[in-house]
Image: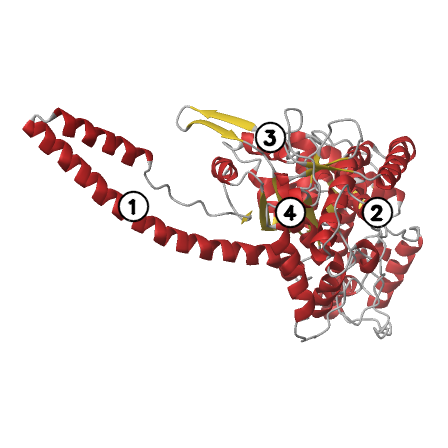
Amino acid sequence: MIDLTAVIDPREALEAVAVASAEWPNLERIGSDLPPVPQMDVEALLPAPLAGYVLDAARRKVAPPEFVAVSLLVSLGALIGARCGVRPKLRDDWIVVANLWGAVIAPPSKKKSPSMADGVKPLKWLSANARAKHAKAMEAYREEVEQHDVMMAAAKKALSKAADADDAEKLQAAKVRIAALKESKPQPPVMKRYTTNDATIEKLGDLLVENPQGLLTERDELAGLLLSFEKSGHESDRAFYLEAWNGTDGHEVDRIGRGSLYIPNLALSVLGGIQPERLEKYLDSAAKDTGNDGLLARFQLIVWPDSMRFEWRDAAPDKVLRDAVYKIFETLDDDDFIGAWGAEPADQFRRIPSFKLSKEAAQAFIAWDTNLQTRVMPSCAPVLQEHFGKYEKLVAGLALILDMAERADVSGMIGPVREKPMLRAIAWADFLGEHARRVYHLWMHPEVRAAQKLSDALLQRKLPDPFSTADIQRKGWAGLGSPKEITAALEFLESTGWVRATPKPETPTAGRPSKTYAVNPKIHRANAKQEPIKPTKPPKDELNRLNSVSSSVCEDNFSDDPDDEILDFGGDE
């Protein structure tokens, strides 16, 4: 390295920088661009009026329609829940329940939360109605309890009088009366639940006993739920959710303090939003601590669309579309729809009512699944293979949801799941597959992500020049904490010309020498607008001042001034 502080003349200092820059290769861009995702064709993927509702909400929010669509489909799946399923195979008793997990990924302030709220609003509307009905039922219940208490008090008084009078006949009658009153004691009404935001698995178990159709766990920040699984004392939470994804099995819980609890259908739908950085941290911790246990793969309705530019927009919701979608939810909330639309009843082999696939829908599903298993998955990385391996449930569940939504909108459709909803579900799988590739790009290229973080630190001059691996480790940056991660990042940056290992000192020093790296000075170009300083012979009393000036000139050549011309290395946003 050239000792620029020894240069007295500022112009010579600039020339020295130019010479040093010439010795370095031109910079290569850190190539971790996210894989592209297709634009969503809402009207091709969703039937009317769901498509119109999604487009209207997305336009008003100036948000990607994926946010609303995913939330709406997860809400519909949670509403149908474990009340019925679909049998993808014509002879086998395999049943798929429509409880799906969805996640929307976007940086902060990109309309995740308000868009998800639009998708869940119809379900929240049913919840509000259920609370109002429950409030009225509680009033009636309290009146019944008061009447029951009066009658019980009278019966006990009659029993006491009969005992005092030693009247065996009246005594027996009073006992029969008390037994009958105990048998007919009013029971508190159970409020039908559709969603929960923050519940322990113990409370979730209680809620699922009262609501065997299943529930939607809605989290505005999904990272909070994922990280809660890692807390001490919550080791069983993760397993509970992993099992609840299936939605077709009962679940027995035995605790010394709480006794025994049987959940008829352990079925949970999950919906939440997450920022890319938090998703990255979760992927890092999952890979290190628990490995890939398939938790993220269960988020099949996971989307990461390109962000939209801000635009001020103020428009009223389309009331016709809104009412039509709310009517679909209201119709599907009626338990009678299962029998009315031709579902086969539950029996000793099938625990819940179920719909078969039509012949055409079955042929489409078989062709798609064969291609998935024999061509798509073998060509993917293992982590993508696991994700796509759960797409059978995704496609079958989506076909059921889309078919039920159309039946609720247009009456008269009876029988098995039809071909058109199945083809839409398959199109969804193709669409979501591209988003999955974008998500798992973070998982599959940790060395590139680490190099990106380190390059950002170099651009912001957060490290000395030269720097050592110990300098990086002391910073405690996420993704650059271990020597292995740091070495991988440095090797990548060396291969792209960002840094260069400095030669070992010829004179041995005490202790183990620390490997250091020099930074490519081309990271920041010299200030093109800086006027050259004419060389003059300084008087002796100016020598010290100019020495300090030459040092400051070197710093100015790496200025963060917005007028400086800086290399654009791009980025995700």
Residue 389 visible: yes
- Determine whether the residue tagged by mark 1 lies in a helix, strand or loop: helix
Question: The residue tagged with tag 3: helix, strand or loop?
Answer: helix
Pointer 4: what residue? 337
Pointer 2 residue = 434
Estimate the x, y position of residue 315 in percent, counting from the top left. 68, 75
Amino acid type, residue under disc 1 in the picture: Val
Answer with mark 3 or mark 4, whichever residue precedes in sequence. 3
The 10 Å Cα crowd at callout 3, few under 14, some 14 to 19, many 20 or more, is few
Q: Amino acid at mark 4?
A: Phe
Foreground tag (1 vs 3): 1
Residue drawn at 82 percent across, 40 percent down: 358
| Crowdedness near tag 2: few (<14), some (14–19) or many (≥20) residues, C-alpha within 10 Å | some
The span from disc 2 to disc 3 (Cα, nearest Å) is 28 Å
Q: Secondary structure at mark 4?
A: helix
- Compared with 314, 522 (above or below) is above
Mark 1 or 4, nearer chain start:
1
Please tell me whether mark 1 or mark 2 is closer to you in this view: 1
Q: Nearer the viewer, residue 514 or 265?
A: 265
Which mark's residue is nearer the viewer, 1 or 4? 4
Say whether marks 1 and 2 touch (CB < 8 Å).
no
